[in-house]
Amino acid sequence: MLNLQAEIIDRLRDVIRLRLVSDVPLGVFLSGGLDSSLITALMAGLVDHPVKTFSIGFTQSEYDETNYARLVAQRYGTEHHEFVVTPTAQDIFPVLVWHYDEPFADPAAIPTYYLSQLAREHVKVVLAGDAGDENFAGYPRYQNLGRYAVRDDFPSFFSRFNNRKRDWPMFSGSDYWADHNRFSVLTQERLLYYYRITHFHERYQMSLYTDDLKARLQGIFAVDVMLDRYRRSDADNFLDSCLDVDLNLYLPETLMTKVDIASMAHALEVRSPFLDHEFAEFAARIPSDLKLKDGTESKYILKRAAEPYLPHEVIYRPKMGFGVPLDHWFRHELKDMVYDILLSRRAINRGYFRREFIEQMLERHQRGAESWQYLIWNLLMLELWFLMFIDRTWPVPANGPSACRFPFGDHC
């Protein structure tokens, strides 16, 4: 295993070296997590000047990783820069809606936009740690622990699909279920994985959608998108098949899209060493039990490989991800905004969603017993997109890329 750890470092160092070729200054997005910290450490050994590092923080401590980023920055003597995101981040909502140009459901677009803005003040190119989790099984959802544990009493999707017509009347009359092979490639674990990774799974959809929207969606199911990826995977075990799905869905459709648009909004180029195709192919050949040890310890082999380069508390701390304190903001600073937009007459009259479910969702979030922030964010971004691009009642931001207020057809 020591030889494999050394090979991981050697290969990662090589792909970092390739991405340092530039005629302009470079830096690193340093979150304080394992991936970006290891890139910073290895990059510091390849250049003859202090590495420029950039981090985003939050006033809510449970979301703030800047103390870990500082540990790495201090160890390698980087030229470190930080920016704290506050609830006034709502000021960039129109900017995000404009630049993403479609309803985009990842709230990490907020800190990514600010992080790109911060970095562009100092450099034109940065390295980032994207794809480390997909290559080495870094997400908690891969583990059989905590809220992701498979329990005997878990109301699995498998049993829900077996009782589909009773639970989901919209399926009645559809020939969707006639093709029994559509689910034959999915084990119960894979159905549970769909449940873990999906914000609005089918049961929520049945409560949220109006009868008219349900009628329009006969035969279209979100699970089909993931099912198609599982079908095309040649992995021979559950973990590798999920990594395959995420490398081909979650990574390009969410993470890479998020970073690409936020960075290009500031004319900043982002390079991701873990995305190097030869490195990713190498990582895919590593046995899955060395990525997720005993089903509980994520990134096992990468953590061992990083030990000579990073502080123990950075390597073995609980994973936080690039989270945003939406749960707090939606209960306090942004509460009125969310209620006003999602329960407005204009939003309800679109005829897509049931007002009763949205009210219940907001009220349950306000009580604090449950956190519905991601579902609220999804609906909020969709409605703001409607207001800007369909209704054209939300003005294009002043720093939008066009002088035209509404750049659609003959409106300009």
Image (cartoon, rainbow, N blue to C red):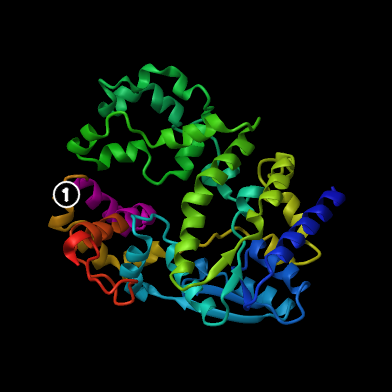
Q: Is residue 267 above or below residue 77?
A: above
For label 1, the crowd category at 10 Å Cα-Cα, with few meaning under 14, some 14 to 19 and many 20 or more, is few
Element at label 1: loop
**Image point 32% across, 65% down: which residue?**
98
Check the picture and name the quadrant holding the C terminus.
bottom left
Magenta span of residues: 353-379
> Which of the two residues, 269 or 235, is positioned nearer the viewer here?
269
Residue 369 on the magenta segment: yes
**Image point 65% across, 72% down: which residue?**
22
Query: Which residue corresponds to mark 1?
Result: 350
**Image point 72% across, 70% down: which residue?**
43
Please tell me in which quadrant of the rendered image residue 20 appears. Answer: bottom right
Amino acid type assigned to the residue bearing label 1 in the image: Arg
Is residue 371 among the parts visible in the rendering? no
Tell me if 154 is positioned left or right of 66 in this view: left
Q: Is residue 239 above or below residue 323?
A: above
Residue 296 on the magenta segment: no
| Residue 362 pos. (x, y %) | 28, 55
Tell me if 365 is positioned left or right of 115 in this view: left
Tell me if 33 is positioned left or right of 265 in this view: right
| Residue 269 pos. (x, y %) | 55, 68
> Which of the two residues, 381 or 164, is positioned nearer the viewer here?
381
